[in-house]
Image (cartoon, rainbow, N blue to C red):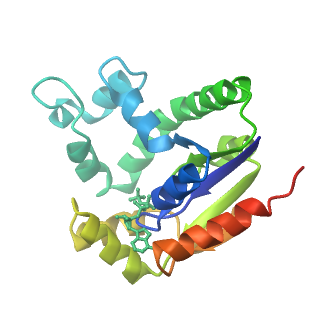
Amino acid sequence: MKVIGITGGIGSGKSTAASIMARHGAKIIDADIISRRLMRKNGKTYTDVVKEFGTQILCENGDINRKALAAIVFKDRERLQKLTDITHRHILPAMLRALVKIKKSGFEGIVVIDAPIPVKQGFLDLVDEVWVVTAPVEARISRIIKRGGISEEEARRRMSMQMSEDEYKDIADRVIANDGSEDELEKILIHISNNLPTK
Ligand code: ATP
């Protein structure tokens, strides 16, 4: 079994890369899905997140309103760090549990961990290789806008709060340039997957 961590900035194409890999037989562990699960009412980070950010981030039914939370943290680096500190403590063990489960099932293919923020120490220990997906800023912005949900201004602000492309590249074993079509991305991924070292 090979474990690949796919990471990169907002709109670079991590999830697209992960779904292409899934179409070719990889198993996916999605940090975003884990983070959502942890924030559900009975989830492990719910209480700490509400304690930190207050009831203003709650919907009427008591669920965490992730949009309201995002609006707060993407305006303030320190608060974003607070949220990261609360969630990462639990995301890493959850990823590890998911990995162990896949391994125990006897799966021998590629497992992709799709993680926007590479939980540095732990993440790098979990994976055999880190693949960083990159794309030109303007392409990322227009893809994010097309995807919908956030404005150009908001997309640029979130980008400025994330690690820079150089910081991502510093931890990369491979840099995947997603600057063409999705078909081209698929070709790159197939080529790399077929040529992974066996050990
Ligand atoms: P986020 O960090 O916001 O979750 P991401 O890195 O996972 O972003 P994706 O969601 O995979 O990025 O891609 C952003 C948008 O760009 C999606 O709507 C996706 O369909 C589109 N996209 C990705 N790659 C390409 C491409 N090569 N050509 C055109 N559109 C693309």
Q: Is residue 192 left or right of residue 119?
A: right
Residue 39 versus residue 120 in the image, above or below: above
Residue situated furthest left in the rendering: 60
Q: Nearer the viewer, residue 115 or 119?
A: 115
Q: Nearer the viewer, residue 139 or 110?
A: 110
Give x and y (percent) for residue 54: 22, 31
Judged from this view, the residue extending furthest toward the front is: 24
Quadrant of ligand 1 in image:
bottom left
The reply, left or right, for residue 82 in relation to residue 133 is left
Residue in view at x 38 percent, y 82 percent = 138
Looking at the image, the residue that sits furthest to the top is 42
Quadrant assignment, res 94: top right
Rendered residue at 49%/81% (across/down): 180
Residue 175 vs 122, above or below: the answer is below
Q: Is residue 174 visible?
A: no
Q: In the rendering, at what x and y percent does residue 23 appear? A: 54, 52
Total tally of numbered discs in the picture: 0
Q: Residue at x 21, y 59 (%)?
A: 149
Task: Choose top left, top right, bottom left or bottom right for residue 52.
Answer: top left
Q: Which quadrant: the N terminus?
A: top right
Residue 11 shows in the view:
yes
Image position, residue 50 (x, y; %): 28, 28
* On screen, residue 104 above or below 69: above
Please state if 122 lies on the left or on the right of 183 as rendered. Answer: right
- Apparent side of residue 166 relative to residue 149 in the rendered image (left or right): right
Question: In the rendering, at what x and y percent does residue 63 appear?
Answer: 21, 27
Q: Closer to the camera, 147 or 66? A: 147
